[in-house]
Image (cartoon, rainbow, N blue to C red):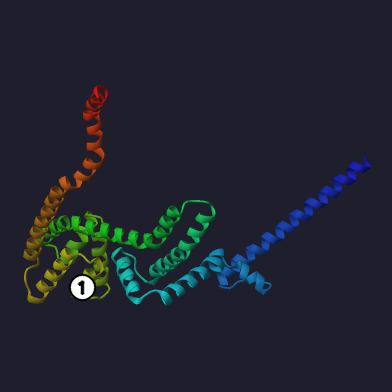
């Protein structure tokens, strides 16, 4: 009995010590959090603890990304940086952070291409597969970015006639250009509506309509949107009715969209020839000429 009571006492003492230690640690961390929020500084005991208080992203990921960005800006041609910046701007990414992230990823893929080739060769994978993987790492980011830019431009071009129609109706109903554009962007969501909303934000913050339209033209990079922006600027300059200009632009955009649809329809038979020649015709020849070939072989 004495042994059991002694063991129970020891266990109870250990549990109390652990609970007390955990309570002290919790109280200390709570005090640090409160001081960090209220007073804007961190209570630390030494330099190592101060460094460990920072998130893992700030201690590891951010320095690595900064190093890759510096390498990219030093060894990448200036023309490539500017063209990439325009592509990212046309996709709706603004500021230098998106450009820095893309440069860091681009440098990582360039460095990783020969490493992937070496690793795949050590694993016994054929050289052709390693070359394909290296080419994908080298050319993949730019190809994906260009494809996204093309898809966004196609989306903008497809939605432009509908937006112009609704904008024309709203202006002819008595709304001002900004009010009609605001209503149109709310009713028809999409990439072009986002760009128009950004243009409205620039106008409301004090920028002129002409400057905002020129900035929209540079961001989007679509010829039809450039023509629309130029017509609006000229209408403001010469005092022409915006309703008439919008109606003419809407009719022209509908005609262009119909012509683009006809061009795609005329290209369809040519594109269908490739799968027909290489996939359908061989199977058809086997089905039709196979029995005849077998009979000829038996007779000979």
Residue 125 point in image, percent of width and height: 49, 51
Point 25% across, 31% down: residue: 286
- Residue 247 picture quarter: bottom left
Residue 118 point in image, percent of width and height: 51, 59
Asked which secondary structure carries label 1, the reply is: helix
Q: In which quarter of the image is the C terminus?
A: top left
Nearer to me, 245 or 126:
126
- Residue 58 picture quarter: bottom right
- Residue 23 picture quarter: bottom right
Point 55% across, 66% down: residue: 60
Q: Above or below — where is 227 with respect to 160?
A: below
Point 48% across, 59% down: residue: 117
The outermost residue toward the front is 300
**Left or right position of 140 against 161:** right
Total labels: the figure holds 1
Q: Quadrant of the N terminus?
A: top right
Residue 250 point in image, percent of width and height: 10, 59
Residue 32 point in image, percent of width and height: 63, 67
**Left or right position of 148 against 211:** right
Residue that badge 1 annotates? 214
**Left or right position of 128 against 289:** right
Point 52% across, 57% down: residue: 119
Instruction: Mark 1: give few (<14), some (14-19) or many (20+) Cα within 10 Å.
Output: some
């Amino acid at each position: 009995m004495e042994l059991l009571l002694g063991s129970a006492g020891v266990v109870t003492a250990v549990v109390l010590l652990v609970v007390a230690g955990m309570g002290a640690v919790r109280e200390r961390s709570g005090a640090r959090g409160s001081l960090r929020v209220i007073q804007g500084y961190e209570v630390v005991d030494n330099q190592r603890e101060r460094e460990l208080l920072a998130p893992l992203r700030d201690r590891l990921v951010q320095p690595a990304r900064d190093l890759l960005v510096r390498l990219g800006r030093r060894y990448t041609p200036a023309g490539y940086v500017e063209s990439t910046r325009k592509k990212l701007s046309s996709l709706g990414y603004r500021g230098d952070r998106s450009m820095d992230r893309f440069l860091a990823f681009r440098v990582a893929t360039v460095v990783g291409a020969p490493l992937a080739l070496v690793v795949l060769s050590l694993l016994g994978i054929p050289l052709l597969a390693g070359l394909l993987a290296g080419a994908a790492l080298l050319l993949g980011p730019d190809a994906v970015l260009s494809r996204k830019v093309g898809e966004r431009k196609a989306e903008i071009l497809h939605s432009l006639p509908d937006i112009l129609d609704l904008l024309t109706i709203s202006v002819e109903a008595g709304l001002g250009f900004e009010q009609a554009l605001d209503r149109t962007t709310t009713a028809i969501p999409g990439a072009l509506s986002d760009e128009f909303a950004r243009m409205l934000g620039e106008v409301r913050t004090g920028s002129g309509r002409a400057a905002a339209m020129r900035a929209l033209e540079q961001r989007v990079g679509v010829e039809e949107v450039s023509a629309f922006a130029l017509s609006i600027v000229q209408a403001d300059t010469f005092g022409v009715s915006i309703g008439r200009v919008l109606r003419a632009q809407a009719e022209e955009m509908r005609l262009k969209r119909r012509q683009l649809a006809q061009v795609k329809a005329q290209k369809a038979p040519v594109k269908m020839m490739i799968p027909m020649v290489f996939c359908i015709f061989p199977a058809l020849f086997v089905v039709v000429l196979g029995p005849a070939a077998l009979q000829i072989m038996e007779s000979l």
